[in-house]
Amino acid sequence: MIRFDNVTKKYQDNEIAVNQVNLNIEDGEFFVFIGPSGCGKTTTLKMINRLIPLTTGTIYINEKRISDYNIHELRFDIGYVLQQIALFPHMTIAENIAIVPELKKWDKEKIYNRTTELLEMVGLDPETYRNRKPKELSGGEQQRIGVVRALAADPSIILMDEPFSALDPISRQKLQQDISLLQKKIKKTHRLCHA
Ligand code: ADP
Ligand code: MG
């Protein structure tokens, strides 16, 4: 479903960040990049949803070049968890989770139920957390919201860039297990980065 054909990324200062990558990721596959800081993991992920342009080569999703997709169409179906936590500070937790469902015009009740379900999934009591602002959560709690926000509207691809880096080892293991179980249940194509 995701295919890289000789993909290279050169930033403006001529540094090659990603060098002639070829790979195939099947539907339902859990695919992980592992490598040291600076090896090109974030760059590779960002090229998939066109947050940054590639220099040469081609990326296909379902055998269609990503450059041939309408950008909104492409991104609507790709959940993305940033390496830096990036919740909107002026919005509540529930509103942050509901961003893509709102864009997709889900009805209120469906959004409410989905938010409840996702908060429960990551061990945050919905009634306690729903109306809080991001700054009222710990770093690890914010990161969990970042992860469930990417899952909210059931995208077919989820890109996760070191989504567990702000978590303590116990919460990290728990959320890794949750996501692994969830992935088995829903068979999404995950890409997950570890430094
Ligand atoms: P990783 O996520 O594996 O730590 P990155 O993809 O962030 O690695 O970076 C890969 C390489 O590209 C690094 O050498 C980094 O310095 C460089 N790089 C990343 N972003 C930019 C940028 N916007 N401009 C120039 N070089 C960059
Ligand atoms: Mg990175």
Image (cartoon, rainbow, N blue to C red):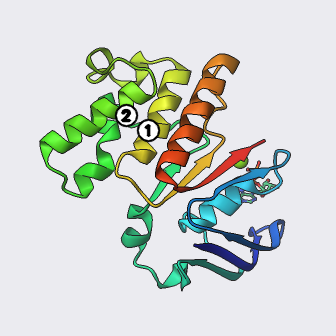
Q: Dot 1: what SS?
A: helix
Q: Which residue is mark 1?
A: 148
Residue at 59 percent across and 79 percent down: it is 60
Taking the image as shown, residue 61 lies to the left or right of residue 106, namely right
In front: 29, or 131?
29
Q: Quadrant of the image for the C terminus?
A: top right
| Spatial CA span between label 2 and label 1 | 6 Å
**Residue most extreme to the front:** 185
Expressed as whole percent of the image width and height from the top left, the position of residue 192 reads 65, 48
**Is 41 above or below relative to 96?**
below
Residue at 40 percent across and 16 percent down: it is 136
In front: 187, or 121?
187
Q: Dividing the image into four quarters, tell me where ligand 1 lies.
A: bottom right
Expressed as whole percent of the image width and height from the top left, the position of residue 6 reads 77, 80
Q: Are marks 2 and 1 in contact (CB under 8 Å)?
A: yes
**Residue most extreme to the left:** 108
Expressed as whole percent of the image width and height from the top left, the position of residue 164 reads 63, 33
**Is 187 above or below relative to 69?**
above
Expressed as whole percent of the image width and height from the top left, the position of residue 116 reads 28, 30
Residue at 34 percent across and 51 percent down: it is 153
Disc sitting over residue 161 in the figure: none
